[in-house]
Image: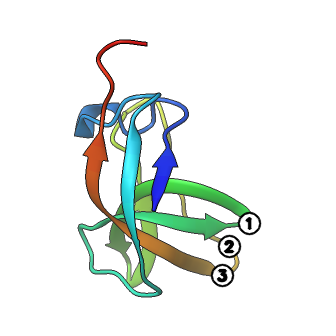
Amino acid sequence: MLIPIKGDSMIDAGIHPGDLAVVERRAAANVGDIVVAIVDDEFTLKTLAREAGQFVLQPANPAYPVIRPRGALEIFGVMVGLVRKYRH
């Protein structure tokens, strides 16, 4: 599936607003994968990481904090590609 990118939290990974993330639907992912996750009933695209034995979501922009879910962290899918338009 294609998911439009909003915001600049993954800009340092080369993922820009307006890009389309190619996402493979999966319920599991590996540390280091860029994932679409559901945290506190909101979808987000971040890198899956581990911190003190817990899964966290790492942005690729220092202006944003690491997401440390208080409740459940659900993996919706794993990004496997990226589509970018050069003209709007």
Task: Tell me the amino acid under the disc marked 1.
Answer: Asp
How far apart are the two marked residues, 2 and 1, measured between alpha carbons? 8 Å
Q: Which residue is mark 2?
A: 70
Describe residue 54's horizontal placement relative to residue 49 as left or right.
right
Specify how the rendered protein is coloured.
Answer: rainbow
Task: Tell me the amino acid under the disc marked 3.
Answer: Ala
Indicate which disc residue 85 carries.
none
Q: Which structural element holds mark 1?
A: loop
User: CB of mark 2 within 8 Å of CB of mark 1?
Assistant: yes
Q: Nearer the viewer, mark 2 or mark 1?
A: 1
Instruction: Name the residue rendered at 30%, 40% in the picture.
Output: 83
Can residue 70 be seen here? The reply is yes
How far apart are the two marked residues, 2 and 3, measured between alpha carbons? 7 Å
Q: Between 88 and 75, which is closer to the camera in this rendering?
A: 88
Mark closest to the chain's N terminus, 2 or 1: 1
How far apart are the two marked residues, 1 and 3, measured between alpha carbons? 8 Å
Instruction: Name the residue rendered at 43%, 13% in the picture.
Output: 88
Q: Position of residue 21 (x, y in %)?
A: 38, 49
Indicate which disc residue 72 carries.
3
